[in-house]
Image (cartoon, grey):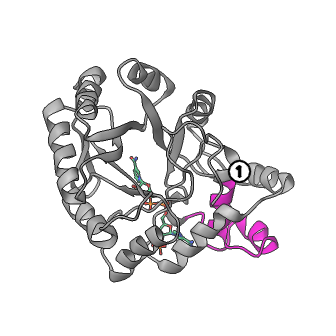
Amino acid sequence: MRAPAHAGQPSVPPRPPGYTPWGHGSREHRSANGEHAGNGVDHGTSAGIGAEYVRRLADEALHPYPKGLLIATKGGLVRTGPNQWHPIGRPKYLRQEVEMSLRRLKLERIDLYQLHRIDPEVPLEASLGELKAIQQEGKIRHIGLSEVNVEDIQRARRVVDVVTVQNRYNLADRAHEAVLTYCEKEGLGFIPWFPLATGGLARPGSVLDEVARRNNAKPAQIALAWLLARSPVMLPIPGTSSVTHLEENLAAAELQLSQDELSALNKQVATG
Ligand SMILES: NC(=O)c1ccc[n+]([C@@H]2O[C@H](COP(=O)([O-])OP(=O)(O)OC[C@H]3O[C@@H](n4cnc5c(N)ncnc54)[C@H](OP(=O)(O)O)[C@@H]3O)[C@@H](O)[C@H]2O)c1
C-alpha cells in the first residue's frame, strides 16, 4: 500500500480503497469483508442506513478487529424505504446513533464518525456540537462530513476539527472539484463515494477498456487508479460483494497511469 501523502497528519485516515458493507448480505460479501481486513486494508466503513443490519454484518465479518484497522461509520441520514432518505441531525438522535454503532460494532471508540447529511431543519452547529461533546467523552476519535460544499465545511470547522469529507465523485462525475481542491489545500481526507459510478465504470465496453488493456488491468482498476492519481488526499471506498473484485480493487493501488493516459481519461470520460 502506498503511504498517504499526508503522512505526518495523523488525523487523516489512510488512503487505500476501503470496504463498505452496503446492503449486501451474501456469504461472499462477508468473506470479502474479512479478506479485506486480512489484506492490509486499514479503513473499513459501515453506513448508518437501515443500519443495524449493516453494522451486525461488519461485526460478524471482522470482529475481533485486526490491529491498525480504522473503522469509519456515519450517522444522521435514515432510509425508510426504497429511495426514501431523511436527514435527522437532532442532537439526541445523533447520540443514539453513535451509541448504537458502538454497541453493534463492539467498539469503545469509533475512529471516524461522519455526519451523513446536514439536516436543513437543525442548525449545523447543534448537530456538530453534539458530536463534539461525544468526542470529548472519548466515544469518537475523528469527525467527518458528507455531501457538503466548501461553505458548509468552513462553517463546520468553526465548531469541530473536520478530518474528512465524503462526497460523490468519480471519473464520470466530478461535480465536487471545488471541494476536492479545498480538501487538498487544507489537508483533509476526501472520500469519494460511488468511486466506480455504482459499477458503471467497471463494466467492459467503456473508454476505460483501452487503458485497461495496455496496463493488463480491469476497467474498475483504471477508475480507481485514476482517483488515486487525481489527489494525494483521495480515499476511495469501492463497494463489492466479490472477493475477486476486492482483490482487483486492492491491486489498483499499485497501478501507475502515465500522464498521457490520465489526460486521455480526463478528456474522454464525460463528466457530470
Ligand atoms: N456518503 C454518502 O451519502 C453515500 C451514498 C451512497 C454510497 N456511499 C458509499 O459509497 C461506497 C460505494 O458505493 P457503491 O458500492 O454503491 O458504489 P461503487 O463502489 O461505485 O460501485 C460498486 C459496484 O461496482 C461493482 N464492482 C466493484 N468492484 C468491481 C470490480 N473490480 N470489477 C467489476 N465490478 C466491480 C460492484 O459489484 P460486485 O459486488 O459484483 O463487485 C458494485 O455493483 C459505499 O461505501 C457507500 O457507503 C456513500
Q: Is residue 108 magenta?
A: no
Q: Would you say residue 154 is visible in this rendering?
A: yes
Question: Ligand 1 closer than 8 Å to the CB at disc 1?
Answer: no
For residue 259, side relative to residue 2 (left or right):
right
Q: Helix, strand or loop at disc 1?
A: helix
The total number of labels drawn is: 1
Q: Nearer the viewer, residue 42 or 228?
A: 42
The span picked out in magenta is 200-226
Residue 70's place in the image compared with 203, above or below, is above
Q: Is residue 210 magenta?
A: yes
For residue 10, side relative to residue 217 (left or right):
left
x then y, percent, for residue 173 = 58, 47
Q: Would you say residue 202 is visible in this rendering?
A: no
Q: Amino acid at mark 1?
A: Ala
Crowding around mark 1 (Cα neighbors within 10 Å: few <14, some 14 to 19, many 20+) is some
Q: Quadrant of the N terminus?
A: bottom right
Can you name the residue that lies furthest to the front here? 67
Please give the residue where the numbered disc 1 appears in the rendered image. 229
Quarter-of-image position of residue 46 = bottom left
x then y, percent, for residue 117 = 33, 37
Question: Which residue is drawn at the image coordinates 44% and 62% (left, top)?
Answer: 19
Question: Which residue is drawn at the image coordinates 78% and 69% (left, top)?
Answer: 210
Q: Quadrant of the C terminus?
A: top right
Q: Nearer the viewer, residue 249 or 67?
A: 67
x then y, percent, for residue 193 = 48, 51
Can you name the residue that lies furthest to the right here? 260
x then y, percent, for residue 139 = 25, 41
Question: Which residue is drawn at the image coordinates 50% and 63% (left, top)?
Answer: 41
